[in-house]
Image (tube, rainbow, N blue to C red):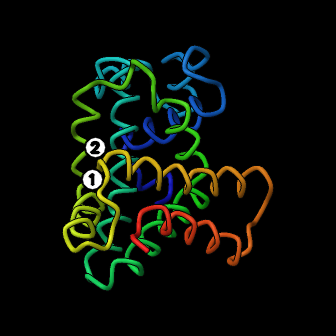
Amino acid sequence: MNVQSMTKRDQILKEATKLITEEGICDSPMSQIAIKAGVAVGTIYHHFKSKDEIINEIYVSIRKNVGDVILENTKNKVDLKKEFKSVSLGIYDYYVNNPIEYSFLNQLEHSPIITKKSHVECEKYFAPIFQSYQNGIEAGLFVDMDLMLMGMLTYNNIITLVELSIKGGHLSPQIVDQALEFSWRGIAKR
Protein backbone atom coordinates (compact mmCIF):
# COMPACT_ATOMS: atom_id res chain seq x y z
CA MET A 1 0.00 0.00 0.00
CA ASN A 2 1.54 3.33 -1.01
CA VAL A 3 1.27 6.48 1.08
CA GLN A 4 -1.24 8.10 -1.28
CA SER A 5 -3.70 5.22 -1.00
CA MET A 6 -3.42 5.04 2.79
CA THR A 7 -6.08 6.73 4.84
CA LYS A 8 -4.94 9.29 7.38
CA ARG A 9 -5.89 6.83 10.10
CA ASP A 10 -3.71 4.12 8.54
CA GLN A 11 -0.84 6.58 8.14
CA ILE A 12 -1.10 7.57 11.81
CA LEU A 13 -0.98 3.90 12.89
CA LYS A 14 1.94 3.12 10.59
CA GLU A 15 4.02 6.09 11.71
CA ALA A 16 3.13 5.60 15.38
CA THR A 17 4.32 1.99 15.13
CA LYS A 18 7.66 3.06 13.69
CA LEU A 19 8.14 5.99 16.06
CA ILE A 20 7.26 4.04 19.21
CA THR A 21 9.51 1.19 18.11
CA GLU A 22 12.45 3.51 17.41
CA GLU A 23 12.02 6.07 20.21
CA GLY A 24 9.98 4.34 22.89
CA ILE A 25 6.59 5.26 24.28
CA CYS A 26 7.68 8.26 26.36
CA ASP A 27 9.65 9.81 23.50
CA SER A 28 6.75 9.49 21.06
CA PRO A 29 4.33 12.31 21.88
CA MET A 30 1.24 12.87 19.79
CA SER A 31 2.86 15.96 18.28
CA GLN A 32 5.74 13.86 16.95
CA ILE A 33 3.38 11.17 15.66
CA ALA A 34 1.46 13.92 13.83
CA ILE A 35 4.65 15.26 12.22
CA LYS A 36 5.74 11.79 11.09
CA ALA A 37 2.26 10.98 9.76
CA GLY A 38 1.97 14.34 8.00
CA VAL A 39 -1.25 15.29 9.76
CA ALA A 40 -2.35 17.81 12.35
CA VAL A 41 -2.54 16.76 15.98
CA GLY A 42 -6.28 17.44 15.83
CA THR A 43 -6.56 14.86 13.05
CA ILE A 44 -5.07 12.26 15.36
CA TYR A 45 -7.63 13.12 18.04
CA HIS A 46 -10.37 12.90 15.43
CA HIS A 47 -9.48 9.22 14.97
CA PHE A 48 -8.18 8.27 18.44
CA LYS A 49 -8.95 9.32 22.02
CA SER A 50 -5.37 8.90 23.23
CA LYS A 51 -1.94 7.50 22.52
CA ASP A 52 -2.89 4.47 24.60
CA GLU A 53 -5.78 3.79 22.21
CA ILE A 54 -3.37 3.99 19.26
CA ILE A 55 -0.97 1.60 20.98
CA ASN A 56 -3.73 -0.91 21.75
CA GLU A 57 -5.04 -0.78 18.20
CA ILE A 58 -1.56 -1.39 16.80
CA TYR A 59 -1.00 -4.24 19.25
CA VAL A 60 -4.27 -5.96 18.33
CA SER A 61 -3.64 -5.43 14.62
CA ILE A 62 -0.21 -7.06 14.77
CA ARG A 63 -1.55 -9.96 16.82
CA LYS A 64 -4.31 -10.38 14.23
CA ASN A 65 -1.67 -10.53 11.49
CA VAL A 66 0.13 -13.28 13.39
CA GLY A 67 -3.23 -14.98 13.96
CA ASP A 68 -3.81 -14.90 10.19
CA VAL A 69 -0.51 -16.75 9.75
CA ILE A 70 -1.64 -19.35 12.28
CA LEU A 71 -5.03 -19.73 10.64
CA GLU A 72 -3.49 -20.08 7.18
CA ASN A 73 -1.18 -22.84 8.43
CA THR A 74 -3.81 -24.78 10.38
CA LYS A 75 -6.64 -24.82 7.86
CA ASN A 76 -5.42 -27.75 5.76
CA LYS A 77 -5.48 -30.22 8.65
CA VAL A 78 -2.32 -32.04 7.64
CA ASP A 79 -0.61 -34.23 10.19
CA LEU A 80 0.12 -32.49 13.48
CA LYS A 81 3.89 -32.42 13.08
CA LYS A 82 3.70 -30.77 9.66
CA GLU A 83 1.09 -28.36 10.97
CA PHE A 84 3.21 -27.54 14.02
CA LYS A 85 6.29 -26.84 11.91
CA SER A 86 4.29 -24.90 9.33
CA VAL A 87 2.73 -22.65 11.96
CA SER A 88 6.05 -22.13 13.74
CA LEU A 89 7.89 -21.35 10.52
CA GLY A 90 5.08 -19.03 9.44
CA ILE A 91 5.31 -17.03 12.67
CA TYR A 92 9.11 -16.94 12.43
CA ASP A 93 8.98 -15.72 8.83
CA TYR A 94 6.35 -13.12 9.66
CA TYR A 95 8.41 -11.57 12.45
CA VAL A 96 11.69 -11.69 10.53
CA ASN A 97 10.02 -10.02 7.56
CA ASN A 98 8.25 -7.45 9.77
CA PRO A 99 10.91 -6.44 12.31
CA ILE A 100 9.20 -3.18 13.26
CA GLU A 101 6.01 -5.03 14.19
CA TYR A 102 8.05 -7.65 16.06
CA SER A 103 9.92 -4.94 17.97
CA PHE A 104 6.67 -3.15 18.80
CA LEU A 105 5.18 -6.34 20.26
CA ASN A 106 8.39 -7.16 22.10
CA GLN A 107 8.45 -3.69 23.64
CA LEU A 108 4.80 -3.68 24.71
CA GLU A 109 3.94 -7.32 25.40
CA HIS A 110 3.93 -6.89 29.18
CA SER A 111 3.13 -3.19 29.33
CA PRO A 112 0.21 -2.06 31.48
CA ILE A 113 -0.82 0.13 28.52
CA ILE A 114 -2.13 -2.97 26.76
CA THR A 115 -5.62 -3.36 28.14
CA LYS A 116 -7.28 -6.54 29.32
CA LYS A 117 -9.79 -6.01 26.52
CA SER A 118 -6.97 -6.06 23.94
CA HIS A 119 -5.44 -9.20 25.45
CA VAL A 120 -8.83 -10.95 25.43
CA GLU A 121 -9.44 -9.90 21.81
CA CYS A 122 -6.05 -11.30 20.81
CA GLU A 123 -6.75 -14.70 22.38
CA LYS A 124 -9.12 -15.59 19.54
CA TYR A 125 -6.32 -15.17 17.00
CA PHE A 126 -4.33 -17.92 18.70
CA ALA A 127 -7.27 -20.27 19.25
CA PRO A 128 -6.48 -22.48 16.21
CA ILE A 129 -3.05 -23.43 17.54
CA PHE A 130 -4.42 -24.16 20.99
CA GLN A 131 -7.07 -26.34 19.36
CA SER A 132 -4.29 -28.23 17.55
CA TYR A 133 -2.49 -28.73 20.86
CA GLN A 134 -5.72 -30.00 22.44
CA ASN A 135 -6.30 -32.35 19.50
CA GLY A 136 -2.74 -33.67 19.90
CA ILE A 137 -3.26 -34.31 23.61
CA GLU A 138 -6.61 -36.03 23.03
CA ALA A 139 -5.12 -38.21 20.29
CA GLY A 140 -2.33 -39.25 22.67
CA LEU A 141 0.32 -37.67 20.44
CA PHE A 142 1.23 -34.77 22.75
CA VAL A 143 2.32 -34.70 26.35
CA ASP A 144 -0.64 -33.90 28.59
CA MET A 145 0.31 -30.40 29.68
CA ASP A 146 -1.41 -27.10 30.29
CA LEU A 147 -2.20 -25.58 26.88
CA MET A 148 -0.99 -22.10 27.84
CA LEU A 149 2.32 -23.54 29.05
CA MET A 150 2.68 -25.58 25.86
CA GLY A 151 1.93 -22.49 23.79
CA MET A 152 4.40 -20.29 25.65
CA LEU A 153 7.20 -22.87 25.49
CA THR A 154 6.83 -23.35 21.75
CA TYR A 155 6.26 -19.64 21.05
CA ASN A 156 9.33 -18.62 23.02
CA ASN A 157 11.42 -21.02 20.95
CA ILE A 158 10.22 -19.18 17.84
CA ILE A 159 11.05 -15.85 19.49
CA THR A 160 14.57 -17.09 20.20
CA LEU A 161 14.98 -17.85 16.49
CA VAL A 162 13.64 -14.43 15.56
CA GLU A 163 16.03 -12.71 17.96
CA LEU A 164 18.99 -14.67 16.61
CA SER A 165 17.98 -13.89 13.06
CA ILE A 166 17.41 -10.18 13.63
CA LYS A 167 20.55 -9.67 15.70
CA GLY A 168 22.87 -12.01 13.90
CA GLY A 169 21.65 -12.10 10.36
CA HIS A 170 20.05 -14.87 8.35
CA LEU A 171 19.74 -18.29 9.99
CA SER A 172 20.15 -21.30 7.77
CA PRO A 173 17.07 -23.46 7.15
CA GLN A 174 18.90 -26.30 8.93
CA ILE A 175 19.26 -24.28 12.14
CA VAL A 176 15.63 -23.20 12.02
CA ASP A 177 14.55 -26.81 11.44
CA GLN A 178 16.72 -28.00 14.36
CA ALA A 179 14.99 -25.52 16.66
CA LEU A 180 11.54 -26.50 15.45
CA GLU A 181 12.38 -30.19 15.88
CA PHE A 182 13.58 -29.40 19.42
CA SER A 183 10.22 -27.76 20.19
CA TRP A 184 8.32 -30.64 18.64
CA ARG A 185 10.19 -33.18 20.79
CA GLY A 186 9.27 -31.10 23.84
CA ILE A 187 5.54 -31.59 23.30
CA ALA A 188 5.28 -34.86 21.38
CA LYS A 189 5.09 -38.19 23.13
CA ARG A 190 7.94 -40.42 22.07
- Few, some or many C-alpha atoms within 10 Å of disc 1 (few <14, some 14-19, many ≥20)? some
Query: Which element type, helix, strand or loop, lies under badge 1?
Result: helix
Give the CA separation, mark 1 to mark 2: 5 Å
Quarter-of-image position of residue 41: top left
Kindly indicate whether the residue at mark 2 contacts the one at mark 1 (C-beta within 8 angstroms): yes
Residue most extreme to the right = 168
Asked whether 184 or 173 is in front, the reply is: 184
Which residue, given by chain and number where applicable, does mark 1 sit on? Answer: 125
Above or below, comparing residue 61 to residue 111 in the picture: below
Asked whether 79 or 2 is in front, the reply is: 79
Quarter-of-image position of residue 27: top right
Amino acid at dot 2: Cys
Above or below, comparing residue 141 to residue 65 in the picture: below
Query: Which element type, helix, strand or loop, lies under badge 2?
Result: helix
Q: Residue at x 46, y 32 (%)?
A: 109
Q: Position of residue 55 (x, y in %)?
A: 41, 29
Q: Residue at x 37, y 47 (%)?
A: 63
Quarter-of-image position of residue 47: top left
Which residue, given by chain and number where applicable, does mark 2 sit on? Answer: 122
Q: Residue at x 38, y 65 (%)?
A: 69
Q: Position of residue 171 (x, y in %)?
A: 73, 67
- Few, some or many C-alpha atoms within 10 Å of disc 2 (few <14, some 14-19, many ≥20)? some
Asked whether 61 or 89 is in front, the reply is: 89
In the rendered structure, the answer to whether residue 121 lies left or right of residue 145 reads left
Amino acid at dot 1: Tyr
Residue most extreme to the front = 190
Name the disc covering residue 91, or none: none
Q: Position of residue 125 (x, y in %)?
A: 27, 53
